[in-house]
Image: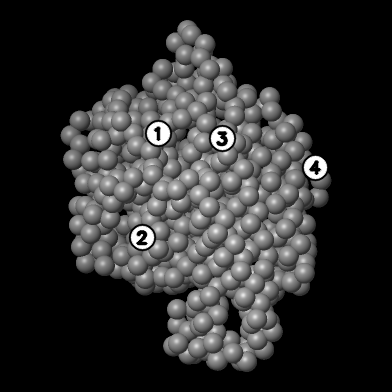
Amino acid sequence: MTEKWDLSFIYKGFDDPKIEEDMDQAEKFADDLANYRGKIKSGELSSKELLEFFQQLEKVHTLADRGEAYGFLLFAQETTNDDHKALYSKVEARAVDVSNKLIWIKVEINEMSDKTVERYLADPVLENYHHYIRVQRLSKPYILTEEVEQVLSQKELVGVLAWYNFYNEFTASFQYQVEIEGAMKTMSHGEIYPFFNDPNPETRENVFKAYYQKYADQSIAISHAFNNIWKNRGQDTELRKFPTTMTPAHIRNQTDEKIVETMIEVIKKNYSFVQDYYKLKARLMGQGEKIKGSDLYAPLGKTMKYTWDEAKKIVLEAYTEFDEEVGEMTNSFFDRKLIDSEVRKTKMTGAFCQGISPDLDPVIHQSFDGKLNGISTLAHELGHGLHDMFSGRKQTILNYNPPTVAAETASVFGEQILIDKLLKIMTDKEAKLRLLSSQLEDAIITISRQTMYVIWEKECQESGAKENLSAKKMSDIWDKHVNDAYGDAVAFLPEQSWNWATIPHFLDKRVFYCYAYSFGMLFVLGLYQKYLEEGKTFVPKFKQILEAGGSKFPVDLAASVGLDISQPEFWQAGFDYLRILLEEFRSIVEERT
């Protein structure tokens, strides 16, 4: 039996008058902050006065974020509910209005003289906001006038946000006609997804074809959405004079282009890892040296099915064995009903953890299907939730959220704890084969495939900013990069050329979102190696990383445990670890073939 979350600790329902009251209060506080206009950039405020300003700003964010998050969560739990859609649209618009009233703040922080900034950064009174000031000034070369920033923010409602919301609502309504064991069935996304790794190869192929063909059939609407995103981003790049299309992502992630380029190059050099794995899997499945595209996620070894209670027990044990306090915090998600794990037709696809503010519990959204991947997803999202909780203990809202590349730290670490626990206790070779293949495929998806997504997105973004890309052109670009990654190890189905159209991250206003997954997993493999070397003495260091929230740059978080992410050797170390697992997998394959 799965669980449904209880969001009443945020608001009592979509018609709770407190939602409107909080949004009104957020807007009033934002208006009051205008009294500081001109005083930020001039540097005339004392450190104590600037501290009071930041604390008032945090009240605005706390109230506005609460309302917007609640509207989104109601929409996510039931995307076709008109009341929920109306609320989400309303609070999203109100949040944009509030955000517009605050645009001048970032502009003025970037207009401060270097001397003024140095004075504020040297004063311990403002210590909690030193990193925030530094991060805001990363955008200094690209900030436009306040009036232009306000217009761009308003246009998001009918631009990027509108197309993103349209895509999610549109695709959530898809119904798939699939033949399952001789019978035609109609399925929602949540219902069809588990069949991608169904034990029956004929079922898998039918599901792959039906799923991707649905997106091909709707390619006019979908490609229109994508092209509008490409054009919007291209205009933004031109207006702000970003050096590259990826610059906004590097600023958002508080990293730099050279580090990301180094990581991507190391990942591309290790595409052979992807190809070696799938050639071994093809041998194991009796397909020679090339596996069928619909068998990419085919289950190997013994089929393992878990109840929700079993999944809960396994994940809780893994986190508790790592650290007792971490285990207790993990259990609180179940005790407080902070997880929605039901499969429902109108539920938003995918899984996520929503951290709202330091004073509110984070909540988790997933559709639990009883498979091993479902348990890994639970451990992953609980890791996000733990990160939010640890951050909330030390940080205020301006430093609460880590950049996306660091936000994956606890989530991927949690998955690693879970998988390694299972690998150690398993004696059944068939079960171990299933787990190893799952771990290796997860690494391929998280590291290699996500990087392939970024490379595809970059080419489409740069071309799509200049010309309208046909759906076929985007599919051709997709096929090119897929072939680079998978080589001659996979025979993809024609329908899989439409895979790009199924990925909502490409429309997210957070451009090049996907490299955070690659970064996060390789970063965590480095941390995990430290944990294996140091044992329990590493745990307090890890907690300090989580407690730092968004108050440190990723390079400094790594340096705090002796890692240098600017070096290719750091990124290669993750693949060296994965190669050990691949060799263990190879030995099982060679025993059986």
Q: Amino acid at mark 1?
A: Glu
For the question of whether residue 157 can be seen, the reply is yes
Q: Choose mark 2 or mark 3, whichever is in front.
A: 3
182 lies above or below 566: above
Q: Earlier in the sequence, mark 4 or mark 3?
A: 3
**Residue at mark 3:** 81
Q: Secondary structure at mark 2?
A: helix
Q: For the point 61% across and 69% down, which residue is it? A: 28
Location of residue 453 by image quarter:
top right
Whole-number angstrom distance, CA of label 1 to CA of label 3: 17 Å
**Residue at mark 1:** 342
Q: Earlier in the sequence, mark 1 or mark 3?
A: 3
**Residue at mark 2:** 389
Q: Secondary structure at mark 1?
A: loop
For the question of whether residue 253 can be seen, the reply is no
Q: Residues within 10 Å of mark 2 (few under 14, many from 20)?
A: many
Q: Residues within 10 Å of mark 3 (few under 14, many from 20)?
A: few
Q: Secondary structure at mark 3?
A: loop
So how many labels did they put on this image? 4
Q: Amino acid at mark 4?
A: Asn
220 lies above or below 9: above
Q: Amino acid at mark 3?
A: Asn
Residue sitting farthest toward the right: 467
Q: Choose mark 1 or mark 3, whichever is in front.
A: 3
**Residue at mark 4:** 468
Q: Residues within 10 Å of mark 1 (few under 14, many from 20)?
A: many
Q: Position of residue 501 (x, y in %)?
A: 63, 36
Q: Position of residue 95 (x, y in %)?
A: 61, 58
Q: Choose mark 4 or mark 2, whichever is in front.
A: 2
